Image (cartoon, grey):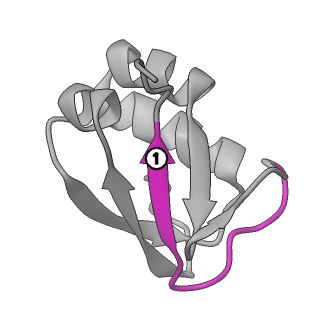
């Protein structure tokens, strides 16, 4: 992550294919950024496979669907990464 970030840390929780691609169920990352910036940094950290999942994923921020990928994430938030699920 950006070493100059001064935001309160975020918790990122991965589910299904996102968990498999990240190789961890959750992690703490520096805050102070938008969802797009966070996704870019996570892809750099974990590789292209996670980057592909993040492009298709939905996100919950503190349990609420987050659609504005440019808005700053709330300090100390929990971000859930939800890839598209198969099945019915």
**Residue 23 x %, y %:** 15, 36
- Kindly identify the residue that appears in the image at 67 percent across and 80 percent down: 74
Q: What residue is disc 1 on?
A: 81
**Residue 82 x %, y %:** 47, 42
- Kindly identify the residue that appears in the image at 31 percent across and 44 percent down: 15
In the rendered view, does 83 fall on the left or right side of 6? Answer: left
Reply above or below: 67 against 32.
above
- Quadrant of residue 30 in the image? bottom left
Furthest toward the front, the residue is 88
**Residue 66 x %, y %:** 73, 57
Tally the numbered discs: 1
Reply above or below: 22 against 61.
above
Q: Main secondary structure of the magenta part?
A: loop
Please tell me which residue lies in front, 78 or 86: 86
Q: Secondary structure at mark 1?
A: strand
In the rendered view, does 39 fall on the left or right side of 37? Answer: left
- Kindly identify the residue that appears in the image at 19 percent across and 51 percent down: 25
Q: Magenta part of the protein: which range? A: 70-82
Q: Residues within 10 Å of mark 1 (few under 14, many from 20)?
A: many
Please tell me which residue lies in front, 32 or 63: 63
- Kindly identify the residue that appears in the image at 60 percent across and 84 percent down: 75
Q: Is residue 40 magenta?
A: no
Q: Is residue 81 magenta?
A: yes
**Residue 57 x %, y %:** 56, 32
- Quadrant of residue 27 in the image? bottom left
Please tell me which residue lies in front, 85 or 70: 85
């Amino acid at each position: 992550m950006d070493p100059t970030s001064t935001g309160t840390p975020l918790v990122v929780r991965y589910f299904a294919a996102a968990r498999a691609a990240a190789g961890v169920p959750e992690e703490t990352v520096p805050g102070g950024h938008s969802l797009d910036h966070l996704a870019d940094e996570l892809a750099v950290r974990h590789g292209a496979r996670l980057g592909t999942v993040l492009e298709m994923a939905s996100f919950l921020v503190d349990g609420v669907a987050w659609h504005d990928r440019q808005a700053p994430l709330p300090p100390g938030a929990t971000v859930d990464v939800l890839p598209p699920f198969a099945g019915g």
